[in-house]
Image: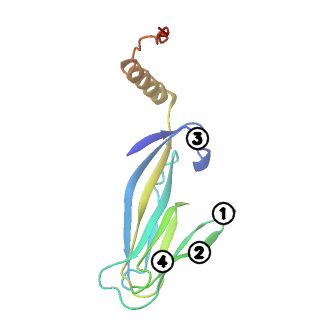
Amino acid sequence: MSFRDDDSSDHGLSGPSKLESFLFSCELSNKVPFYTFQGDEEEDLEHFLELRTVCLGEGAEEESNVVEVTAMNHQGKTISVPIANLHISCLPMVSLGEFELKAPVTIRLKTGTGPVIVSGLHLIASQVEDSDLSDEDEDDEDEDDHEQVFLNPIKPAKKKQAP
Protein backbone atom coordinates (compact mmCIF):
# COMPACT_ATOMS: atom_id res chain seq x y z
CA MET A 1 0.00 0.00 0.00
CA SER A 2 1.37 3.40 -0.86
CA PHE A 3 -0.03 6.85 -1.32
CA ARG A 4 1.14 10.42 -1.72
CA ASP A 5 1.02 12.63 1.36
CA ASP A 6 1.17 16.30 0.33
CA ASP A 7 1.15 17.48 3.96
CA SER A 8 4.58 16.20 4.92
CA SER A 9 5.00 18.47 7.94
CA ASP A 10 3.72 15.66 10.18
CA HIS A 11 6.71 13.52 9.26
CA GLY A 12 9.49 16.10 9.17
CA LEU A 13 10.24 15.97 5.45
CA SER A 14 10.25 19.21 3.48
CA GLY A 15 8.10 19.28 0.36
CA PRO A 16 5.73 16.61 -0.92
CA SER A 17 6.37 13.10 0.33
CA LYS A 18 5.32 9.55 -0.46
CA LEU A 19 4.28 7.28 2.40
CA GLU A 20 4.50 3.50 2.12
CA SER A 21 3.18 1.13 4.78
CA PHE A 22 4.12 -2.46 5.55
CA LEU A 23 2.82 -4.92 8.10
CA PHE A 24 4.85 -5.11 11.32
CA SER A 25 4.83 -7.73 14.09
CA CYS A 26 7.15 -8.96 16.82
CA GLU A 27 6.79 -11.49 19.63
CA LEU A 28 8.23 -10.84 23.08
CA SER A 29 8.83 -13.51 25.73
CA ASN A 30 11.24 -14.37 28.54
CA LYS A 31 13.56 -15.82 25.85
CA VAL A 32 13.36 -12.69 23.64
CA PRO A 33 12.40 -9.82 26.01
CA PHE A 34 12.90 -6.89 23.61
CA TYR A 35 12.84 -5.88 19.96
CA THR A 36 14.49 -2.79 18.48
CA PHE A 37 12.91 -1.30 15.37
CA GLN A 38 15.35 0.70 13.23
CA GLY A 39 15.11 2.22 9.79
CA ASP A 40 17.56 2.19 6.93
CA GLU A 41 20.41 4.65 6.98
CA GLU A 42 19.33 6.34 3.73
CA GLU A 43 19.15 10.12 4.11
CA ASP A 44 15.96 10.73 2.15
CA LEU A 45 13.86 8.13 4.05
CA GLU A 46 12.21 8.40 7.46
CA HIS A 47 10.93 5.30 9.25
CA PHE A 48 8.00 5.25 11.65
CA LEU A 49 6.40 2.49 13.67
CA GLU A 50 2.63 2.74 14.06
CA LEU A 51 1.63 0.36 16.84
CA ARG A 52 -1.95 -0.94 16.64
CA THR A 53 -2.39 -3.92 18.99
CA VAL A 54 -0.63 -5.69 21.84
CA CYS A 55 -1.98 -9.12 22.78
CA LEU A 56 -1.06 -12.22 24.72
CA GLY A 57 -0.03 -15.21 22.65
CA GLU A 58 -0.89 -18.87 23.00
CA GLY A 59 0.40 -20.37 26.25
CA ALA A 60 0.44 -17.14 28.26
CA GLU A 61 0.49 -17.64 32.05
CA GLU A 62 -1.80 -16.16 34.74
CA GLU A 63 0.44 -13.15 35.36
CA SER A 64 0.80 -9.49 34.46
CA ASN A 65 2.73 -8.82 31.30
CA VAL A 66 3.84 -5.19 31.08
CA VAL A 67 5.03 -3.90 27.70
CA GLU A 68 6.93 -0.63 27.40
CA VAL A 69 8.35 1.35 24.49
CA THR A 70 11.52 3.42 24.47
CA ALA A 71 11.85 6.19 21.89
CA MET A 72 12.89 9.83 21.53
CA ASN A 73 10.68 12.61 22.81
CA HIS A 74 10.33 16.04 21.15
CA GLN A 75 13.55 17.24 22.85
CA GLY A 76 15.63 14.35 21.50
CA LYS A 77 15.84 12.59 24.87
CA THR A 78 15.19 8.87 25.24
CA ILE A 79 12.04 8.11 27.22
CA SER A 80 10.41 4.81 28.26
CA VAL A 81 6.65 4.52 28.63
CA PRO A 82 4.49 1.49 29.51
CA ILE A 83 1.84 0.94 26.82
CA ALA A 84 0.08 -2.21 28.03
CA ASN A 85 -0.45 -4.28 31.17
CA LEU A 86 -1.97 -7.55 29.95
CA HIS A 87 -3.46 -10.39 31.97
CA ILE A 88 -4.97 -13.54 30.44
CA SER A 89 -8.11 -13.52 32.61
CA CYS A 90 -9.12 -9.85 32.35
CA LEU A 91 -7.21 -7.99 29.60
CA PRO A 92 -5.62 -10.28 27.00
CA MET A 93 -5.43 -7.58 24.28
CA VAL A 94 -5.09 -3.81 24.00
CA SER A 95 -5.87 -1.70 20.93
CA LEU A 96 -3.56 1.31 20.70
CA GLY A 97 -5.29 3.01 17.79
CA GLU A 98 -2.58 4.60 15.66
CA PHE A 99 0.29 5.06 18.14
CA GLU A 100 3.06 6.37 15.87
CA LEU A 101 6.75 6.62 16.84
CA LYS A 102 9.81 7.63 14.82
CA ALA A 103 12.64 5.08 14.59
CA PRO A 104 14.57 3.90 16.52
CA VAL A 105 12.03 2.32 18.89
CA THR A 106 12.63 -0.44 21.43
CA ILE A 107 9.68 -2.56 22.58
CA ARG A 108 10.35 -4.43 25.83
CA LEU A 109 8.53 -7.01 27.92
CA LYS A 110 9.24 -5.33 31.25
CA THR A 111 7.45 -7.88 33.47
CA GLY A 112 5.95 -11.29 32.77
CA THR A 113 7.02 -14.20 30.60
CA GLY A 114 4.71 -13.66 27.60
CA PRO A 115 4.38 -14.50 24.86
CA VAL A 116 3.16 -11.04 23.84
CA ILE A 117 2.57 -10.15 20.19
CA VAL A 118 2.92 -6.50 19.16
CA SER A 119 1.56 -5.58 15.73
CA GLY A 120 1.12 -2.52 13.58
CA LEU A 121 2.56 -0.82 10.52
CA HIS A 122 6.08 0.07 9.41
CA LEU A 123 5.75 3.44 7.64
CA ILE A 124 8.41 4.76 5.28
CA ALA A 125 8.23 8.41 4.25
CA SER A 126 10.30 9.57 1.30
CA GLN A 127 10.49 12.81 -0.64
CA VAL A 128 8.79 12.84 -4.02
CA GLU A 129 10.73 14.38 -6.88
CA ASP A 130 9.01 16.96 -9.09
CA SER A 131 9.05 14.58 -12.09
CA ASP A 132 7.20 11.96 -10.01
CA LEU A 133 4.55 14.53 -9.08
CA SER A 134 3.97 15.62 -12.69
CA ASP A 135 3.52 11.98 -13.78
CA GLU A 136 0.97 11.40 -11.03
CA ASP A 137 -0.87 14.63 -11.88
CA GLU A 138 -1.09 13.59 -15.55
CA ASP A 139 -2.48 10.21 -14.50
CA ASP A 140 -5.09 11.94 -12.35
CA GLU A 141 -6.08 14.19 -15.28
CA ASP A 142 -6.43 11.16 -17.58
CA GLU A 143 -8.71 9.47 -15.04
CA ASP A 144 -10.78 12.65 -14.77
CA ASP A 145 -11.23 12.72 -18.56
CA HIS A 146 -12.63 9.19 -18.55
CA GLU A 147 -14.96 9.92 -15.66
CA GLN A 148 -16.77 12.88 -17.28
CA VAL A 149 -20.49 12.35 -17.43
CA PHE A 150 -22.68 14.54 -19.59
CA LEU A 151 -26.07 15.38 -18.12
CA ASN A 152 -29.02 16.71 -20.08
CA PRO A 153 -30.22 20.10 -18.91
CA ILE A 154 -33.13 20.03 -16.50
CA LYS A 155 -36.38 21.32 -18.02
CA PRO A 156 -38.92 23.08 -15.83
CA ALA A 157 -42.08 21.17 -15.05
CA LYS A 158 -45.23 22.09 -17.01
CA LYS A 159 -48.15 23.40 -15.01
CA LYS A 160 -51.54 21.87 -15.48
CA GLN A 161 -54.40 24.27 -16.05
CA ALA A 162 -57.47 23.93 -13.86
CA PRO A 163 -60.63 22.75 -15.81
Which residue bears the numbered disc 3?
Answer: 7
* Alpha-carbon span between mark 1 and mark 2: 13 Å
Q: Nearer the viewer, mark 1 or mark 2?
A: 2
Q: Does 42 sit left or right of 76 as displayed?
A: left
Which residue bears the numbered disc 2?
Answer: 80
Discs 1, 4 touching: Cβ within 8 Å: no
Disc marking residue 76:
1
Q: Which of marks 4 and 3 is in front?
A: 3
In the rendered image, the residue lying farthest to the right is 75
Which residue occupies 62% across, 45% down? Answer: 9
Which of these two is toward me, 58 or 12? 58
The three-letter code of the residue at mark 1 reads Gly
Which residue bears the numbered disc 4?
Answer: 108
Q: Which of the marked residues, 4 or 2, is nearer the chain's N terminus?
A: 2
Q: Which of marks 3 and 1 is in front?
A: 3
Which residue occupies 41% across, 51% down? Answer: 21
Q: Which of the marked residues, 3 or 1, is nearer the chain's N terminus?
A: 3
Residue 90, located in which quarter of the rendered image? bottom left
* Alpha-carbon span between mark 4 and mark 3: 32 Å
Discs 3, 2 touching: Cβ within 8 Å: no
Residue 60, located in which quarter of the rendered image? bottom left
* Residue 45: % across, % down: 50, 48
* Alpha-carbon span between mark 1 and mark 4: 20 Å
Q: Which of marks 3 and 2 is in front?
A: 3
Q: Which of the marked residues, 3 or 2, is nearer the chain's N terminus?
A: 3
